[in-house]
Amino acid sequence: MSPQHTNGITMIVVVALVVAVLVVAGPRRKHDDEPADLREEVARLGQMVDELQVSVDLLARKVDSLAPESPAPPSDDRADALPPQIEARVEDVDSATGIVILSVGAEDNVKQGMTFYVHRDINYVAQVKVERVYTVKCSARVQPGTGTEEVRPGDRAVSGLSRPQEADPGGDDAGK
């Protein structure tokens, strides 16, 4: 789910919680200060939060299913045409599924199947392959066996044809 959708859904939950608190709390009564009443009120609010979280999860799934993939731009039929190098930032990572959200999308000429090489500072971290492309973001999956570390938000990702070579001060890798 994109951070924009998450922020919107979070705002809905916050507004719903405020309304719920106002409805449940209502006008103050003399006995509202008693600990038993307060515990019951906290329990009711906790249950409402749980119910709202379920609703948020369902809405998030619906939003994800409605988010259209961007159509692929027309391909260049020249055999010698190289894809453009695209630089991105890792915005989010789901370690359980290996899904990474990158800060680039169709507007940046990202295409499904494109490979990005993730770096932290000057160190190679892992390789990810784009699975879904949206207008300004894309989701990619970490490729098994390609990583030296876990991908983290804030890492840099660069598209390319092969794994970048380590810096060679002698220039032996020039042109690769």
Image (cartoon, grey):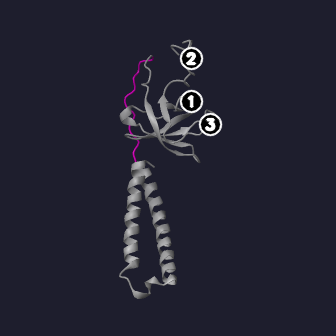
Whether residue 111 can be seen here: no
Does residue 133 sit above or below 46 in this rendering? above
Q: Which residue is mark 2?
A: 168
Name the N-terminal-most of marks 3 and 2.
3
Q: Per the image, is 68 magenta?
A: yes
Q: Residues within 10 Å of mark 3 (few under 14, many from 20)?
A: few
The residue that appears at 51% across and 82% down in the rendered structure is: 35
**Disc 1 to disc 3, C-alpha distance:** 18 Å
The residue that appears at 56% across and 12% down in the rendered structure is: 170
**Amino acid of disc 2:** Asp
Secondary element at tag 1: strand
Q: Which residue is mark 3?
A: 144
**Disc 2 to disc 1, C-alpha distance:** 14 Å
In contact (CB < 8 Å): disc 1 and disc 3: no
Secondary element at tag 3: loop
Q: Which residue is mark 1?
A: 123
Q: Position of residue 23 (x, y in %)?
A: 37, 76
Secondary element at tag 2: loop
Q: In this rendering, would 138 be left or right of 126?
A: left
Q: Residues within 10 Å of mark 1 (few under 14, many from 20)?
A: few
Name the N-terminal-most of marks 2 and 1.
1
**Amino acid of disc 3:** Pro
Q: Position of residue 19 (x, y in %)?
A: 37, 71
Q: Which residues are magenta?
A: 67-79
- Residue at the right extreme, as displayed: 145
Query: Of helix, strand and loop, which mostly describes the magenta segment?
Result: loop
- Residue at the bottom extreme, as displayed: 30
Does residue 164 sit above or below 106 in this rendering? above
In contact (CB < 8 Å): disc 2 and disc 1: no
The residue that appears at 53% across and 43% down in the rendered structure is: 99
